Every structure is written in C-alpha cells, then in structure tokens.
Image (cartoon, coloured by chain):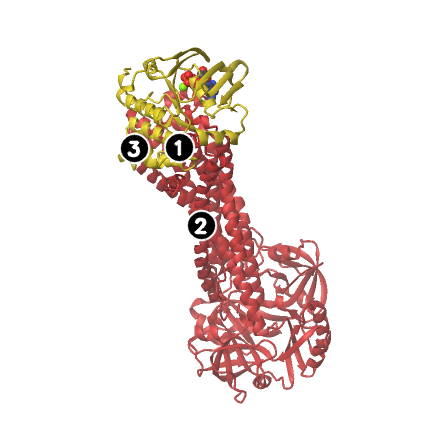
Chain colours: A yellow, B red
Amino acid sequence: MTENTFTIRNLKKIYGHGDTAVHALRGVDLDIPVGEFVVLLGASGSGKSTLLNIIGGLDRASEGTALFRDRELTTMSDSELTRYRRDHVGFVFQFYNLMPSLTARENVELVTEIARKPMDADTALALVGLAERADHFPAQLSGGEQQRVAIARAVAKQPEVLFCDEPTGALDSTTGRAVLKVLKEVNERLGATVLVVTHAASQAAMADRVIRFGDGQVIEVKVNETKLTPEQIEW
Amino acid sequence: MSPLSIKLGRDLWRIKGQAVAIALVVAVGVLLQVMQTGLVRSLDETRRAYYERYRLAEVFAPVTRAPVHAAVDLRKIDGVAAVETRVAGAAMVDLPGAAVPVRAQVASLPAQGAPRLNDVLLTDGRALSGERPDEILLLQSFARAHGLKPGDRISATMNGARHDFTVSGLAVSPEFIYTTAPGELVPDDRRFAVLWMTRTALEAAFDMDGAFNEALLSLSRGTEPDAVMAEVDRLLDRYGGTGAYHLDDLPSNKFVVEEISGIKRTSKTVPPVFMAVAAFLLYIVISRLVDAERKEIGLMKAFGYTSWEVGAHYLKMVLVIAVGGAVLGGVLGILAGRWMVDLYMLYYKFPFLLFRLDPSSFAIGFAVSVLAASAGGLLVLRRVFALTPAVAMRAAAPADYSRARPLGGWMGRVLDQPTRMVLRRLARQPLRMGGAIAGVGAATALGAAMASLLASYDTMVEMSFGVIDRSDVTVTFIHPIAEQSRHDLAAIPGVIEVEPIRVVNAVLRNGRHSYRGAVNGMTVAPRLYRAVDADMADIPIRADGIILSTGLARALDIQAGDRLTLDVREGRRPIVEVPVSGISESLIGSPAYMEIGALNRLLKEPLRISGAFLRVDPVRGDEVYRILKDRPMVAGVALKSESRAALRKMMDQGAGAMRYVMAVIAGVITFGVIYNAARVAQAERERDLAGLRVLGFTRGEVAFVLLGELAAVVVLAMPLGALGGYWLNLAISAGFSTDLYQIPASFGLTGFGQAMIVVLIAALLSGWLVKRDIDRTDLILALKNRE
Ligand SMILES: Nc1ncnc2c1ncn2[C@@H]1O[C@H](COP(=O)(O)OP(=O)(O)O)[C@@H](O)[C@H]1O
Ligand SMILES: [Mg+2]
C-alpha cells in the first residue's frame, strides 16, 4: 500500500453564517499519495483554493479531518500550523507575490532563512534557470520570470509538498510551459508531492493524478496511465 | 544580513521623508526633556556647590546698629553653626560720562582673612590689603560692563559723603548671582554695582565704630530656621532689628530658585504633548504601511514566519525611527542645553556653569519617548496578528465606496469628477480623515499657542511700561523723608509732574501663606503709576483697605473682602490686619497698594515718602539726572526706558529664550504632521491616481485629487486648532510665568493667524513635495507593483 501525503475525509468549509453563508467545501474525501504530481481542475469558485489553503495550513476547516502523513491538521494550534508551513510546505501563487523591496535572491533567502534543510538560494534560482537574474528586483522581471522566482522560493526549502494555485494563470502559454517544466523537475528531482490548481484542462495530461472539482466537492479522480511532458501540452 | 533586515532597510528608505519627519518630532520632545532636566540639574548643583564653597549664610538679620558683642548672644542660639557680622549699606557710584549715577550695595569684609560667612571669589587683581581704607573689590560683572580693571579709580557717595576708591580686585559672590538694583527686577550689569571694603573703612563711612548693621548666620543641619529667626529677632530687637529673613527670601537666590522651578514646570507639561503627537504620527504611518503590506504579511506567514517574527519586523521599523529620533534629540538637547547655559551665564553670575546631563532623566526621557512612539506601533501590531496567511492568496478587494454614493446625485451635476473623489474619500474614511484632521488641528493649536505666547511677552512689556507705569524716572530716597521734599523735586527744571510713593517692606500673611514683599503707599488717584483692572481701567487706591496684584492674591490664596495680616518690617514694625479691598492686574512683580496717608498712619510715621515717580521733559532729561544724582537724599534714579530695555533684553536672551526654542519646535511638529498627512494620502491612493493618469487625466487634475484632500483637512482642522490653541495657551503661559513676571494668557487672532501661515507654508511645501513625486510616478510600475 502506498503512503499518503494527505488523507482527507468529509472536509467542509463554510464562510460566514446564516443567509450569507457560503459553502465553499461540502465534504471532500481525497487521498494524495507521496511524490505524485496532482492537478486540480474545476470551475472558478468551485473551492479549489479553499482546499489548498486548508491543507496548506493557511486556513481552517469548518468540519472533517485532513491528515498530513499521520498528523491531523484541523486540530493544530496556530503555532503548530506555522511550524507545519515552515518545515514542510512550499507555496506558489497566481500573482507571484514577491516582495517588491527584495531582489530575486533575497526573496528566496526570505524562506531559506527559516527553513530546516534549505538549498542554497543561488542553487534554487539556477534550478528555475534564473541564476543570472539573482540581483534583479521583481519590478525588473517579466511575469514568467517572477513566477519562476516564486517557484525557486517555494522549492528552496526542499519542501515535502508544493502547492501551486494557478501558477500559470497570469502567463502566456510559452512562459507557462517553462513554469510547468520547472514544477515537474522539482517533483522528480526532489521527490516533492506537487499540487497544481489550474483552469487549463489540457495541463492535466502531465499529471499522475487529476482531480476534478465542482461546487465544493470532488467529482472525479483520474489516474493517468501515460503522461505528456510539459512541452507537449497546448492551451 | 537577513532578507527581513534588508527589507526593513529598503522600506525605511522608501518612507524616509515620513520617517525623518516623525523622528524629528520625537527628537524635539527628547531635546526639550534633555535640555530642561539638564538645565535644572546644572543650575541646582552649581548653585549648591557655590553656596557651600563660599559659605553663603542661611539667615540674614539686618539691624540699625548693634554692638559687636551682640554677636556673642547670636552664636549661643540653639542650632546656629556660625555667625558673621558686617557693615552693609547703599551707595551711588559716579562714573565719568554716565548721566545717571549707578546704585550700589556695599558690604564689609574682615580686614584680615576670609569672612566666616558670605565669602567672595576673587577673579582679578588682589584681595583687600587691610592697610589702605580706600581699596575696594568690585563686582566683576559691573567692572566688565564699564571696562574697569584693578588699579582704576572710581568715586562713590555713601551716607551722604563722597569718597574716592582704588579698585584692588574684581570679585563674584553667591550672594549676588542675580543682581538687581533695589526695587528693580531685571539685572543690568551696567546699572548695579557691589563694592566690598574693609570693615574698618565701612565702619568709618557709616558711623559704625564697634558696631554692625547686618548679622549673617549659618545653621547646623536639621535646624528649623523659623525658631532661630524668631530668637534672632528677639535678641536684635533693641538694636533696631528689622527682621531676620531666610536665604529663601534673598532676592538673588529667590530668582535662581524660581527660574529652576519654572524650567521644571514647563518640562512637565510641554514634552509630553510632543510625545503624544509623535506617537500619533507613528501610529498613522505604520498602520498605513501594514495595510499596504497585507499581502506581504500574509505571505510571510504562509512561509512559516510566526506572527511575532512578522510583528517584530514592523516594530523594528517603529523602533528605528523612535530611537533615531531620541538619539538625535539627545544630541540636540545637549547642544541646546549648552547654548542655554551660555545665556544663563549672562544673567546668573555663577563663576562657572557647566551643562550637566542628568543621566537618569535622560534615560527616562529616552525610554519614555521610545515607548510612547512604540505605543502607536503596538496598536498596529494587533492587526498584524489578526491577519490570516490566507490573505496572501486573495487579491485585495476594491475599497468600498458605497457609503459615499449619495454624492453621485445632485452633486454630480455641480462638481467635477476630481472634486467628487475628494469628497467621497472624506465621507468614506471618516476615521482616517478624522485622524489627519486631529493631527493637523493639534499642530495648529500648538503653533497658535506658541505664537500667542510670543505676542504675550510684548503685551506684558507694553502693559507694564506703557499702561501701568507712565512715568519716565523713578527716584528712591536713602530713607523715608518728609513729604514736602516732593516740592523740591517738582522745582527741578524739566520735571513736569511728581507723584510720591511710600514703599514699606512687609511680610504679608494669610493663614499659612506668607509673602515677603512690600506695600506701595500711593495717592488716591495716581496718574504716573497706577493700579489697573483686567480691562486696564484705573482702580482707585483706598485708605480703608489694601489692593493686591493678581499674582500676590494667588500666592496668598486670598480674595477681595478677606482680611490680611501685614507684618511691617521697618520703623516700629507694627503687625496689623487690613481688609483686601481689591485685586489689580499686574504683570511684573507682585505689588500691593494702599493709600499713602493711611499707610503712614499704620506706621505712625505721618507725611513720609520713600520715593517718587517723575514725568520729565525729554529735552531736559540729562540735566534733571545730573541734578538728581547730586541730591544727598537720593539713593537711586531709575530710567524707565532703561528698565524696559533691560527687561526686553532679558526676555530675549535669558530664561525667556526658551520660548523661541519651543516656537521652532512647534514649527517642526506642524511640518511633520502635515507632511505625513500628505504622504499617507499619497501612498494610500498611489494606484488610484496612476489609474486616473492612465485614463487620461492630467497631472494637475490628479494632483488636485490629492492636494484637494490635504486642503480640506487643513480647513477642517482650523476650528479645532483655534479651540485647542486657546486652552494650550492658557496652560503654557501659566508655565512660563515666574515670580518676576506673569505672562498674560492672550490667545488672539494674530497668533492664530501666524500659526495658520506656518500651517499653510507646511501644507504648500508638503503638497509640492508630494506633487513632485506624483509627476515622477512611473505609471506602469505603479499599476504593476501591487498585484
Ligand atoms: N474569505 C472568503 N469569504 C467568503 N467567501 C469566500 C471566501 N473565500 C472564498 N469564498 C467563496 O468560497 C467559494 C470557493 O472559493 P475558492 O476556493 O476561491 O474557489 P476557486 O479557487 O475554485 O475559484 C467561492 O464561492 C468564494 O466566493
Ligand atoms: Mg482560486
């Protein structure tokens, strides 16, 4: 039996209360095995980000359980969640979210500084092909480059899990492919479990596992027998 | 260096203008604190050391004429440590070329060795030899003011006879740190002298062979001076003792002490106001920064930074600004303190006065200012803690302007788009706008109060020398003389009007309150020197009661209608009760008035005058002075023009100079507040404004949105500033008032107008600085930076 990175049961998330309550997650059951490249598909507003935020330790569930390996996330205290994010998790966001006042290298160092067994910031930047741009500020980089810095920042701590919320959402397809290629490499070379949220259904073709989301629930889980390389994907 | 430290540095650099403005506000608070506590310590310690080293007496007992052996009895009084006797008196120094003779005090020194009490410090030349009776020591400040050196000769009139002297040396004394001619309040080095002569010479000059007319006493530790003074009075009564008084009532000491407590008073009221303003500014700036960095904060938390680590990052920013300001303030405070010490040395004749930093109060001031400044930052930290890391994942929601929707209606037709944006913002963020208005209002209040204070000093001089005292010359006699002498004065060619006065030294008591001063006996409806009420209308002088000045009434805690005990300290020394018949406005000194005839009757010395106010034909002024100084009974001639000039000079150079320091500080704060308001508004709206530019609005129109907001804040802050200024002026003028002079609280349009000018200049300058930045804004960057 393969070990799971995440074991999720009946996970619910309700924003607000009463008439205005929004049921973002309506009982999610999922198993995500270690080391897989997982793609989450689904319409806007279907709850993908909400799920990612909860299992990434950024937000709290309203109900249900979510195990990271054998540790229960939903009952963790704030400081335990902070530790969890610090030690195990990397994030990549749609809008890069680099610190504008820090250079590319310094943005990466922001994370390596507090990580347990980080790689060198320059190594991480080399991994995403940006070794030469280490001293540039975010404002001096293109969108794709900024996103690659964000990935370098996320992988530099050598996380066990990498969460990417629409990493290619703001990029054209050529740039997006380069980003996906880096994510795939991280998945293969570091053995990290990678969860990618995307709108582009075609990107599912490169995943080990595809999870289709709709209205706060898992509609379908598909395991790909054959996978395409990022270069082969069109969107 | 850690990336967070780097971010800290770059963020600080980005808000450097604001950081500097806030640091300056913190700095001025610390500056005042350091300067004032340092001054208090310097003056206090120097005074104590000086008194101790030169053995200044604790009790002074003037007497008409006591035989030398009377001192033996004084020494036997319980608690008396040492007794010295001397011959002292008044003199007039004639200087070639000076129209008016200079009033002087003379005191004897033992022929051999140092006196047991009230020693002097020889600064130039040599001590009195004891063999030559024509040798004198001269007060250093007087000698310097007239260019007199050891070896020079001067002549002086004492006890009606003229003597020639050789200056053997110059000296200073703890008894004469603050030197004024008797009856005057402001020191003028040129117009007051102290002469020290050998006992033998003075005994001869004042017919005091084998006698003394002043006893000096020091007390052993823990002795109650009142008991000793009562015993001294009892022993000296038969020799014509006029009442022993304590060092506390020695004029020189009184002024020094009053000065020190004045500084203490202002140091307790003013710096805290500045600290509060600084804390408020820091709160505004840091909270705006935290709002703008919601995403960054969420991001750091998402990476696993704890709330504490993130909070510490922003707190460090506050601390860098606060500590930077405090350090700067400390340095400036030391410099300002040294400068003030130099000014003090002009009026307070200490042989040395070093600015001594008070380490404990410096530490406290430093800590308090940093804490106060951080308090603003700490409030903001709550928000850092409350932010969830999930914020990093969301795009910021557009600000909700729905509350301002009604503006769209009729106003839409009247107002253009940029004007409506200004109004909407005022309506939508009333709290934040309210904060800005409160800040600018506070700064305006501070400026207006300070400007009014500056004007109050002028009012004080004008009222005292233009309205209350309308004479040209004040003549003082050696001792009270017959009332008819006024006709002799009136007969001097050039004298237009003579108004007699009888000044009687007395202790005024009301219950446990007492004040050592004098009662002025005046005619019923005086014209040259008047008692006036708050509206500057004459108060008739009464025979059936005493009129007290406001300062005196306050000191005695007494009101019109109450009864006052008058303990007369001359002549037969009667103790009588008199009713208080009125309170008069007075800005200089603390006088009391009574009808001259009634006063003389109390003393059982009818028809006596001790001086006169004269109105003089300005053309014949010099002639009048020459005649006056040759009259044997005349002890002193004071020109009002000189007194007025001296008072002005002292207020500008001495203690009053502090008001200029504070006015500058108020200006700094005003600028700091307004510049911050402008910067905060700009930072909050950077993207909106760039958006407007992209849509095709011109730079001018875009700037209008921002500057219009600033203008609206300034206008709305005006009434607040006026109200606050009024109250602050009351508090500050009370703080600046001393025993010597009262600063009238006079909050007026002029002061407010001046403050508004400063505010407008600050607003224009800030607006210009901000507009320059808007013009330079890279549109692409502004839109791209904060996604
Ligand atoms: N902080 C929030 N408050 C209220 N509703 C929210 C919040 N965040 C997300 N939602 C709602 O939850 C639902 C799921 O959102 P999200 O997980 O962001 O969807 P997705 O990422 O799949 O587009 C949406 O209807 C959204 O409006
Ligand atoms: Mg989403």
Q: Residue at x 43, y 14 (%)?
A: A46
Q: CA distance from mark 2 to mark 3?
A: 54 Å
On the image, the x and y values in percent for residue B235 come to 72, 76
Amino acid type, residue under disc 2 in the picture: Ile
On the image, the x and y values in percent for residue B500 come to 58, 67
Question: What residue is disc 1 on?
Answer: A157
Mark 1 is surrounded, within 10 Å at the Cα level, by few (under 14), some (14 to 19) or many (20 or more) other residues, namely many
Residue A159 or B611: which is nearer the viewer?
Answer: A159
What is the chain letter for disc 1?
Answer: A
On the image, the x and y values in percent for residue B618 come to 44, 67
Closer to the observer: label 2 or label 1?
Answer: 1
Marker disc for residue A187: none
Q: State whether residue B430 appears in this view.
A: yes
B453 above or below B503?
above
Question: What residue is disc 2 on?
Answer: B665
Amino acid type, residue under disc 3 in the picture: Ala
Q: State whether residue B464 appears in this view.
A: no
Determine contact: label 2, label 3, CB under 8 Å.
no
Mark 3 is surrounded, within 10 Å at the Cα level, by few (under 14), some (14 to 19) or many (20 or more) other residues, namely some
Question: What residue is disc 3 on?
Answer: A126
Tell whether B749 sits left or right of B53: left
Q: Secondary structure at mark 2?
A: helix
Quadrant where the N terminus of chain B is found in the figure: top left
Number of numbered markers: 3
Tell whether B302 sits left or right of B266: left
Q: CA distance from mark 1 to mark 3?
A: 14 Å
Amino acid type, residue under disc 1 in the picture: Lys
Residue A189 or B572: which is nearer the viewer?
Answer: A189
Q: Secondary structure at mark 3?
A: helix
Q: Residue at x 46, y 48 (%)?
A: B323
What is the chain letter for disc 3?
Answer: A
Mark 2 is surrounded, within 10 Å at the Cα level, by few (under 14), some (14 to 19) or many (20 or more) other residues, namely many
